[in-house]
Image (tube, rainbow, N blue to C red):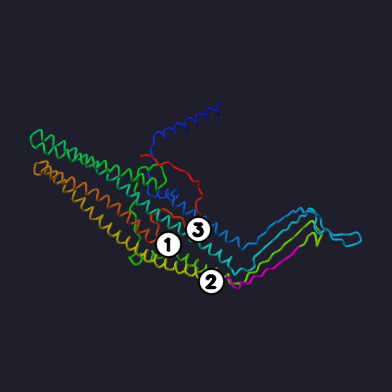
């Protein structure tokens, strides 16, 4: 009885705790690292990349099966119209064709030489498997950059909402002061009307900012594959990669997964030419067979070994055409590789310049914010003693709001620029997030589901 009571009490306690947690309805804070990891596990682009890896692995098994022997068991039963026998004299005869005939065979076939096409085709499939895994790494890096941009957009949007709310509080206070001074005759009704209009404008700007923040959060949640985003906790300052411009460009050509992918594709295309040329070489295969049958003529069972030789002489130019096509494929991959080198260098240059611009813009925006804060303080002091007009204070308030928002945007733009620079040279875009390597196995296949779009 005591044991049952203990179990019941435990169950009630657990139920109450779960109910309290569910009733609280709070989502745990969301960091950039947690959101990026969630996106890497749930986003559709990663599922497609994993599917390509699994397909490439299946192609390796398919190509490898061509070099293995084939073993078949065959059987046949035939019902003839009449039995056929051969009389050998002395009352003895052999049945050549029984009325109901059957036979079976066990066949083992093995290709001994096929112009090395099977082995080289398997090597090509392995290279394509490597390409699929490298492309998955490239896809993951692109996704991390996309999610990071969405994360900092959401952070900036939320902070813009905070600036608007602070400005509204300031304008409310100034309108209250203006009304009091109007009552004692220090200000006119026009001054009070200016503050009222400014308050309405700030409230309108707040509504727009809140809508933009909600859209940014919804987009981030969809990218991360989560139903709801908690409070956003920005990471510390993202460190940019070290090195001179030339060193960063060299690292980009050495470490970008796109270059490794094209180098592997180039090797596979060269090997494919040898695969096609193998059709000009002779083919040899062996066939080991054991046969059993009902009829005793010539024997009711036997074992045979056959070697087949095929020497291609003329195939109407089919092999030559395939070789020519394979050579053009090699040329195409080589041209694509050279084009990719230019594209990667352009991306590296753009990322380097964008980062420097973002750093300079951040410094300028911080200087502007500090100057606007000091100017607002001076104008507010002058306004309180009647040395400045309401228009002067309104202009100073607007400038301070714009300067604060500009500093917020510049700060997070600098973080995105640092991540983009790391991505451009092939480094992990977000420190602390390990991207799937070329040797990592893809995630398991998931059944397709339809998830309704949440209504804000």
**Residue 311: in magenta span:** yes
Which residue, given by chain and number where applicable, does mark 3 sit on? Answer: 439
Which residue, given by chain and number where applicable, does mark 2 sit on? Answer: 320
Question: Where is residue 254, by image quadrant?
Answer: bottom left
Looking at the image, the residue that sits furthest to the bottom is 313
The kind of secondary structure element at disc 3 is loop
Looking at the image, the residue that sits furthest to the right is 90
- In the image, 258 versus 81, the foreground residue is 81
**Picture residue at 69% right of the left edge, 61% below the top:** 108
Residue 127: give x, y in percent of width and height: 51, 63
**Picture residue at 71% right of the left edge, 56% below the top:** 74
| Mark 1 and mark 2: Cα distance apart in space | 32 Å
| Mark 2 and mark 3: Cα distance apart in space | 37 Å
In primary-sequence order, the first of circles 1 and 2 is 1
Which corner quadrant holds the C terminus?
Answer: top left
How many other residues sit within 10 Å of disc 3, few (<14), some (14-19) or many (≥20)?
Answer: few
Which residue, given by chain and number where applicable, does mark 1 sit on? Answer: 258
Residue 440: give x, y in percent of width and height: 50, 56
The kind of secondary structure element at disc 1 is helix
| Mark 1 and mark 3: Cα distance apart in space | 16 Å
- In the image, 103 versus 121, the foreground residue is 103
The kind of secondary structure element at disc 2 is helix
Magenta residues, start to end: 303-316
How many other residues sit within 10 Å of disc 1, few (<14), some (14-19) or many (≥20)?
Answer: many
In primary-sequence order, the first of circles 1 and 3 is 1
Looking at the image, the residue that sits furthest to the left is 185
On residue 286, which mark appears?
A: none
Q: Horizontal placement of 40 versus 173: left or right?
A: right
Q: Are marks 2 and 3 in contact (CB under 8 Å)?
A: no
């Amino acid at each position: 009885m005591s044991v049952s009571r203990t179990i019941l009490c435990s169950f009630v306690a657990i139920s109450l705790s779960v109910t309290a947690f569910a009733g609280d309805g709070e989502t745990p804070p969301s960091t950039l690292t947690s959101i990026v990891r969630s996106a890497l596990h749930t986003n559709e682009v990663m599922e497609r990349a994993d599917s390509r890896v699994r397909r490439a692995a299946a192609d390796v098994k398919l190509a490898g099966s061509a070099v293995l022997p084939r073993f078949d068991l065959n059987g046949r039963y035939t019902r003839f119209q009449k039995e056929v026998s051969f009389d050998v004299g002395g009352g003895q005869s052999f049945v050549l064709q029984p009325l109901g005939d059957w036979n079976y065979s066990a066949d083992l076939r093995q290709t001994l030489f096929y112009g090395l096409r099977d082995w080289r085709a398997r090597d090509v499939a392995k290279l394509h498997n490597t390409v699929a895994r490298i492309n998955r790494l490239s896809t993951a890096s692109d996704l991390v950059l996309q999610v990071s941009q969405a994360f900092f957009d959401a952070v900036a949007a939320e902070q813009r909402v905070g600036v608007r709310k602070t400005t509204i509080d300031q304008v409310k206070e100034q309108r209250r002061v203006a009304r009091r001074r109007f009552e004692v005759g220090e200000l006119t009704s026009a001054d009070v009307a200016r503050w009222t209009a400014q308050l309405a404008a700030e409230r309108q700007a707040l509504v727009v900012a809140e809508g933009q923040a909600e859209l940014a959060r919804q987009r981030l949640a969809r990218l991360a594959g989560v139903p709801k985003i908690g409070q956003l906790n920005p990471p510390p300052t993202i460190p940019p990669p070290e090195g001179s411009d030339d060193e960063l460009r060299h690292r980009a050509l050495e470490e970008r997964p796109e270059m490794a992918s094209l180098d592997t594709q180039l090797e596979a295309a060269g090997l494919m030419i040898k695969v096609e040329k193998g059709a000009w070489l002779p083919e040899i295969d062996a066939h080991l067979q054991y046969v059993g049958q009902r009829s005793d003529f010539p024997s009711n069972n036997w074992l045979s070994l056959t070697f087949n030789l095929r020497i291609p002489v003329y195939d109407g130019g089919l092999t030559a055409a395939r070789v020519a096509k394979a050579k053009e494929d090699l040329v195409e991959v080589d041209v694509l590789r050279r084009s990719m080198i230019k594209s990667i260098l352009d991306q590296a240059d753009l990322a380097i310049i964008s980062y420097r611009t973002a750093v300079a813009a951040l410094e300028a925006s911080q200087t502007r914010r500090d100057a606007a804060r000091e100017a607002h303080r001076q104008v507010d002091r002058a306004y309180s003693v009647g040395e400045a007009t309401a228009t002067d204070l309104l202009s100073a308030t607007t400038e301070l709001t714009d300067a604060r928002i500009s500093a917020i945007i510049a700060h997070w733009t600098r973080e995105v620029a640092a991540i983009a620079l790391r991505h451009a040279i092939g480094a992990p875009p977000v420190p602390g997030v390990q991207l799937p390597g070329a040797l990592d196995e893809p995630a398991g296949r998931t059944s397709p589901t339809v998830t309704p779009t949440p209504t804000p």
